[in-house]
Amino acid sequence: MELNVDKQCVDVAVHTNEVKLIGKLVKDKWGRLYNKLNGYITTHLEVKRQSETVDTIPLKISNKVIDVDTLKSLENTDIYIEGKVISFDRLINDKHKLIIMIGVDKITDEIPDNLTTNNFVKLEGIISKVPTFRKTPLNRYITELNLETNISEKYSSRIPCICWSHLAVKAAEFEVDTVITVIGRFQSRDYTKKLSDGSVISKTTYEISIQTIDGVDTK
């Protein structure tokens, strides 16, 4: 499981990539433990929205941040996490799939008092594809953005983002290679996909739901 290596990003400034989450670890969602001595474990965090909808967010946690036994002891506790949005390519059934996760830098059961939301993401990055603008069946405007953010001098993350309504109209005008800073939340979204044999499967996608873009006024 490797992050995206971008040779061009070596000479480019590291971008802002900040995540703050409050939630509960999901029982029975523990992934494979990689390299018990110096590796990491994968798991998921349930984060509630104001609407009571729950986003189930995948996490990658290094053994250097917290040991496995201590981590599992926090299963029934509200925890606070700081980290970065990371992505990497994985070959699944001969197709490349972009995997999105939170790379955890800090995890604790001490919840800060000054947070105004339990799902905060701030990203600076480069528009890597032409934005996709469309109208939903309910006549809502939506724009899909692909944001490339350099998380170190050697690695970058490709992050899918969406925004709605008037912000979507403005975001649709962005050109490729434009640098923007966005604030939003990390969300999971379930959907169904019909296969060629007629069967239907359930899938989950992950993206950043953008609430504001620096310098963009939607009034």
Image: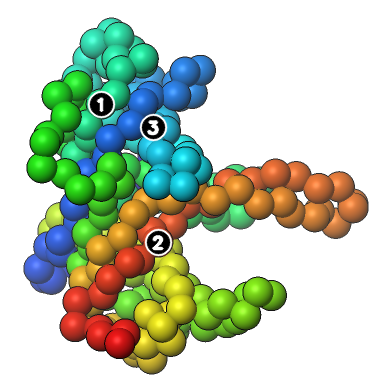
Tell me if label 3 and label 1 are in contact, CB under 8 Å: yes
Looking at marks 3 and 1 on the same chain, the residue that comes earlier in the sequence is marked by 3
Residue 132 vertical placement versus 61 (above, below): below
Which residue is drawn at the image coordinates 16% and 29% (left, top)?
Answer: 111
Q: Residue at x 36, y 16 (%)?
A: 75
Residue tagged 2: 209
Cα gap from disc 2 to disc 3, whole angstroms: 17 Å
- Mark 3 secondary-structure assignment: strand
Where residue 200 sits in the image (x, y, percent)?
81, 48
Q: Secondary structure at mark 2?
A: strand
Residue labelled with disc 1: 79
Earlier in the chain: of badge 2 and badge 3, it is 3
Dot 1 amino acid type: Ile
Query: For mark 1, does the 10 Å Cα neighbourhood hold few (<14), some (14 to 19), or many (20 or more) residues?
Result: some
Label 3 vs label 1: CA separation? Answer: 9 Å
Viewer-proximal residue, 77 or 122? 77
- The quadrant in which residue 58 appears is top left
Q: Which mark is residue 45?
A: 3
